[in-house]
């Protein structure tokens, strides 16, 4: 399997990719490589947890990781994320995938793929329908951006086709095909259902199928009896929707969950005395948290003042107090393991008081009073208090303004009125997918007042963001994203904090299959 | 009696309408864009504008209120913009879980509380009375979330006697009752204390009244006097408190639903408010308000049925 897998960050991404998937898959299956071998046990149930309730079973309206945890076991894709510590992908419904040129990706489907409920074999028409419906303006799919420059899918045979892009798009291999928008649905089933579905599944194409959804409680998947691939390891997967991490930990300790993410606060306790028959594991996360400064705010138009703030914030202290020493300081918005990750930031993570004082003196803004807007989560509040203490060391009085979720997420929104003008400092955190393009997308000029609340607009940054999406040379792409982060930091408007961490706990009777960021790939979970 | 019931029902309708209007205004005045929250970061401005239009957010607030009441009167609580399901379906899916939790808590706490109250009253100033008093006050003083967490850790994690999360398998009444034990224990315990103290105080007051002395003078058995005459009157304030207590239990159910990862109306309201899912917020708040008003009205009517003085005074 390793031969057919193209690592996104470790190897240059060639202009042409050619995967002899069918033969490679056979070899890999024979060697037992790639993903865990199922125990074939009957009467088994896997109990996992998501942090929120399911929203939709339609990939076009999937709201992210929670829905995808449910979609991935029931829908097949051309390629899937490969479980492990390094980002990569492996073939799924595709027997082969070949990048013919920058804008054409040829694929052929396995001949043993089909849909439940009598909807027959999976064909290239299903692939065409699944991908093109996402970009159809009439459907109003919120996931349309993930399909980037898709033009159309050309069907060249019953199981063969070509994905045609308008221009080169590297995230296709890291976000589009192996994630939400890569799910293949049955054209016939969806058309019979009126073109879209809500929370009732119509046809599954993966090793599991949807059995039931108990709102605010759990979703149950069962083994797909029509699945011709490697037999699913569990008869049933129960996915409990538990928002509170502490509740999930108690449920795990009470024996009611087999796998869950745990809180950073509990990690030390769980590691030192783990519940019986369980394993605690840590994964780096892709999230990125930072302190942003609104450069159009009258007080923060002063670049020297912003730089003084950059140097006075002591990230290691924040890691200790707010993240319990588990998370590490970040160097930018792109996490380790992804193209564009920087080994070091321009401004060191640790405080440089002398430098900060010097910059403040140069700014002429001594004694300034500022405010930081913070989402009311414990880690944020603690971090804000440390930043408050840090700033007081150079005589800046910082007011901490707490907000609940929906209020916080409109603070910098220009369409919500003039409140963005009052934004000074922000403690912010964005989620991320395993491609750097997803990180830089929010800081372009077009995003000013949308999600770019620092309101920084750099022409070079925008050009880098555009060009890097299409750049096929991994080295060049890496350099582009590193430069983009340098540009962000040089404005003085950003102090990068952390990518956080994803600690998980699982029963020893379970062999989990996780993405490098610790998110579960339930279809590949097996019995230990 | 019919006149009394009519008056109470009319008043209940006015209270419900006012509460819902007030909540509608508050919810719409707090900042936060539901369309942006619902559609997530990848939504285009066009999609956001389209959703705002579909939710009627482009209309002035008074018009939105009128539309809401108009729809409500025709039995339409609107559509959940997240899942495209009718709000009424969503609310009535969650409601039975909350009702089961509230009624389970009320029933066991009322039975135990009334027993403890009577027990204390008939043994006034004895050691048993003092011990019961201490116990009742301790129950009142113990925060429900502390009880919830410790009962979880002890009964679910340590002893594994009861389940820690969920509401049980649909259709399996036994399993659902089993899942009710810890949450109803957590939110009902303080009510045992309240009811015990209330019943004791009422009993002592009633036991000193003339008709009880008369009954004793006639030589009726003490047990007969206590449970047949005194308790019947002493329980009246308890019924009122339980009626009002429905509101408190609805609030307490929120944390129980979070701590025990149970489905329910409280959790639905919290989730909907944080996502500014206005149709679901209004639908669930409307049902909660009706529940609260109905329970207080019902307790008033039961009081009137049991006590002719209330009927006559009204």
Image (cartoon, coloured by chain):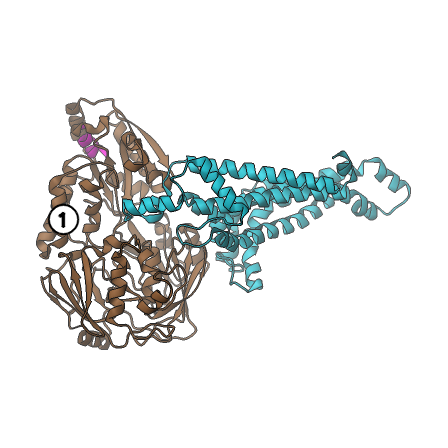
Chain colours: A brown, B cyan
Q: Looking at the image, which is closer to me, A430 or A162?
A: A162
For disc 1, the marked residue is A466
Residue A306 colored in magenta in the image: yes
Residue A499 in sight from this viewpoint: yes
Q: Mark 1 lies on which chain?
A: A
Instruction: Name the image quarter holding the C terminus of chain A.
Output: bottom left
Q: Is residue B151 left or right of residue A71?
A: right
As displayed, is residue A16 above or below residue B12?
below
Q: x, y (%) of residue B287? A: 54, 46
The answer to which image quadrant residue A41 occupies is bottom left
Q: Give the range drawn in magenta.
A: A305-313
Please provide percent x and percent y for residue B246.
60, 44
Residue in the foreground of this view, choosing between B258 and B37:
B37
Q: Looking at this view, is A198 or A257 the one in front?
A: A198
| Crowding near the residue tagged with mark 1, few <14, some 14–19, many ≥20 C-alpha atoms within 10 Å | some
Which residue is at the far right? B218
Quarter location, residue A484: top left
Q: In this view, does A181 lie above or below B254?
A: below
Q: Is residue B88 covered in magenta?
A: no
Residue A508 position by quadrant: bottom left
The residue at the point 27 percent across, 65 percent down is: A129
Q: Most prominent secondary structure in the magenta stretch?
A: helix
Instruction: Give the residue at x 15% y 26%.
Output: A358
Q: Is residue A31 above or below residue A291?
A: below
């Amino acid at each position: 399997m390793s031969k057919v897998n193209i690592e996104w960050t470790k190897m240059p991404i060639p202009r042409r990719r050619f995967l002899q998937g069918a033969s490679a898959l056979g070899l890999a299956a024979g060697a037992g490589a790639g993903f865990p071998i199922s125990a074939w046990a009957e009467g088994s149930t896997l109990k996992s947890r998501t942090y929120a309730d399911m929203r939709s079973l339609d990939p076009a309206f999937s709201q992210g990781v929670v829905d995808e945890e449910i979609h991935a076991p029931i829908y097949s894709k051309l390629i899937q994320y490969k479980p492990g510590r390094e980002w990569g992908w492996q073939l799924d419904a595709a027997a082969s995938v070949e990048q013919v040129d920058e804008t054409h990706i040829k694929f052929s489907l396995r001949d043993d793929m089909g849909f439940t409920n009598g909807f027959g074999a999976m064909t290239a028409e299903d692939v065409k329908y699944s991908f093109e419906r996402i970009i159809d303006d009439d459907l109003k799919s919120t996931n349309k951006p993930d399909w980037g420059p898709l033009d159309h899918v050309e069907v060249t045979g019953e199981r063969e086709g070509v994905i045609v892009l308008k221009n080169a798009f590297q995230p296709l291999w890291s976000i589009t095909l192996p994630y939400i928008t890569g799910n293949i649905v049955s054209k016939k089933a969806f058309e019979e259902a009126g073109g879209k579905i809500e929370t009732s599944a119509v046809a599954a194409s993966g090793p599991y199928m949807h059995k039931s959804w108990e709102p605010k409680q759990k979703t149950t998947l069962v083994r797909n009896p029509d699945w011709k691939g490697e037999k699913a390891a569990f008869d049933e997967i129960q996915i409990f929707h538990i928002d509170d991490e502490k509740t999930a930990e108690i449920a795990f300790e009470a024996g009611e969950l087999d796998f869950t993410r745990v809180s950073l606060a509990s990690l030390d306790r769980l590691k030192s005395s783990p519940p019986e028959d369980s394993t605690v594991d840590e994964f780096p996360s892709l999230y990125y948290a930072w302190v942003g400064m609104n450069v159009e705010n009258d007080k923060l138009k002063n670049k020297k003042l912003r730089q003084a703030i950059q140097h006075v914030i002591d990230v290691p202290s924040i890691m200790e107090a707010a993240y319990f020493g588990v998370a590490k300081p970040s160097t930018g918005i792109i996490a380790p393991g992804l193209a564009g990750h920087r080994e070091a930031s321009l401004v060191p993570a640790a405080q440089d008081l002398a430098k900060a004082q010097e910059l403040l003196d140069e700014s002429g803004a001594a004694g300034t009073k500022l405010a930081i807007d913070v989402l009311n989560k414990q880690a944020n509040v603690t971090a804000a208090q440390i930043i408050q203490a840090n700033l007081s060391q150079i005589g800046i009085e910082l007011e901490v303004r707490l907000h609940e979720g929906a209020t916080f997420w409109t603070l910098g929104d220009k369409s919500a009125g003039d409140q963005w003008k009052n934004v000074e400092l922000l403690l912010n955190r964005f989620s991320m997918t395993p491609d750097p393009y997803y990180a830089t997308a929010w800081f372009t000029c077009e995003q000013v007042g949308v999600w770019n609340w620092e309101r920084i607009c750099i022409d070079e940054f925008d050009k880098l963001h555009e060009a890097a999406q299409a750049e096929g040379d991994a080295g060049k792409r890496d350099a582009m994203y590193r430069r983009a982060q340098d540009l962000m930091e040089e404005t003085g408007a950003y102090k990068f904090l952390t990518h956080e961490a994803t600690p998980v706990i699982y029963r020893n009777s379970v062999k989990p299959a996780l993405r490098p960021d610790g998110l579960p790939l339930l279809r590949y979970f097996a019995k230990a | 009696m019919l006149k009394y019931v009519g008056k109470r029902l009319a008043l209940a309708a006015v209270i419900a309408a006012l509460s819902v209007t007030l909540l509608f205004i508050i919810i719409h005045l707090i900042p936060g864009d539901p369309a942006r929250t619902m559609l997530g970061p990848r939504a285009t401005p066009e999609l956001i504008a389209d959703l705002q239009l579909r939710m009627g957010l482009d209309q002035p607030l008074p018009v939105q209120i009128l539309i809401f009441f108009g729809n409500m009167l025709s039995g339409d609580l609107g559509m959940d913009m997240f899942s495209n399901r009718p709000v009424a379906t969503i609310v009535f899916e969650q409601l039975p879980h909350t009702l089961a939790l509230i009624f389970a808590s009320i029933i066991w706490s009322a039975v135990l509380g009334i027993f403890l109250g009577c027990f204390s009253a008939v043994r006034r100033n004895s050691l048993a009375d003092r011990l019961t008093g201490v116990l009742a006050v301790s129950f009142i003083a113990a925060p429900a979330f502390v009880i919830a967490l410790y009962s979880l850790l002890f009964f679910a994690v340590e002893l594994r006697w009861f389940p820690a999360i969920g509401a049980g398998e649909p259709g399996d009444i036994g399993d659902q009752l089993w899942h009710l034990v810890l949450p109803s224990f957590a939110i009902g315990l303080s009510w045992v204390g309240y009811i015990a103290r209330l019943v004791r105080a009422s009993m002592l007051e009633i036991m000193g009244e003339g008709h009880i002395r008369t009954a004793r003078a006639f030589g009726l058995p003490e047990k007969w006097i206590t449970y047949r005459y005194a308790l019947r009157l002493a329980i009246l304030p308890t019924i009122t408190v339980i009626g009002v207590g429905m509101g408190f239990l609805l609030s307490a159910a929120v944390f129980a639903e979070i701590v025990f990862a149970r489905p329910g109306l409280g959790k639905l309201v919290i989730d909907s408010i944080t996502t500014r899912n206005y149709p679901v917020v209004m639908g669930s708040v409307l049902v909660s308000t009706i529940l609260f008003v109905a329970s207080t009205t019902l307790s008033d009517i039961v009081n009137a049925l049991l006590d002719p003085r209330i009927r006559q005074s009204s």
